Amino acid sequence: MSRRLLLVDDHPGTGKAFASALRDWSITHVGDADTARLLLEDEGPWNVVFLDVHLGGEIDGLELLQERAGEHPETTFSLLTGDGSPDIVETARRLGASYMRKPVDVGVLRAWLAQL
């Protein structure tokens, strides 16, 4: 069975980079939290969900994490952002999510995913 990764990031280049680096994963890339909500509800389960903190739209990635992380215990969540604010890092940890800064080092990303 293929490992499934949902990437929620409003930058198309991030999706291309993930797809290129993680060819052994089935990756779905969406650019907004509203679409991610639908996929989390209707297309699960997901092995991993990466959420960019700063998204356009009604809510951002941090709010989506707060809203959905507890509803999907089988899913590993990680915040993915260029913002290294201590508040964001602490919130991610409190909600059981990890945190990766952009740009993501491909080797670090692969090693992190291999541990799951």
Image (cartoon, helix red, strand yellow):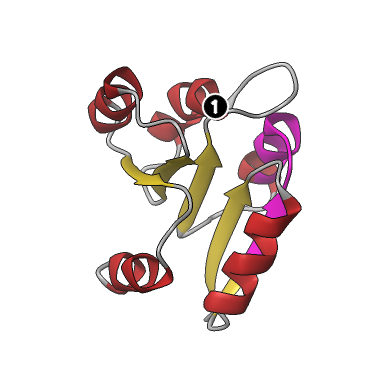
At horizontal 53% and vertical 83% (from top left) the residue drawn is 24
Kindly identify the amino acid type of the residue bearing the numbered disc 1.
Answer: Leu
Place residue 84 in its image quadrant.
Answer: top left
The number of discs equals: 1
Q: Residues within 10 Å of mark 1 (few under 14, many from 20)?
A: some
Percent across and percent down for residue 59 are 64, 19
Residue 34 on the magenta span: yes
Residue shown at 46%/60% (left/top)?
47
Would residue 54 be counted in the magenta stretch?
no
**Foreground of the two, 20 or 3:** 20
Residue located beneath label 1 in the image: 64
Q: Position of residue 11 (x, y in %)?
A: 70, 46
Quadrant of the drawing holding the C terminus: bottom left
Q: Vertical placement of 89 versus 110: above or below?
A: above
Q: Is residue 41 above or below residue 111?
A: above
Work out whether 26 lies above or below 51.
below
Q: Secondary structure at mark 1?
A: helix
- Describe residue 100's horizontal placement relative to residue 5 as left or right: left
What is the x, y in percent for residue 85? 34, 23
What residue span does the magenta drawing correspond to? 27-39
Q: Quadrant of residue 112?
A: bottom left
**Residue 68 percent coordinates (x, y):** 49, 30
Q: Is residue 58 left or right of residue 46?
A: right
Q: Residue at x 31, y 74 (%)?
A: 114
In the displayed structure, 15 sits above or below 83; it is below
Query: Which of 29 and 13 lies nearest the eye of the viewer?
Result: 13
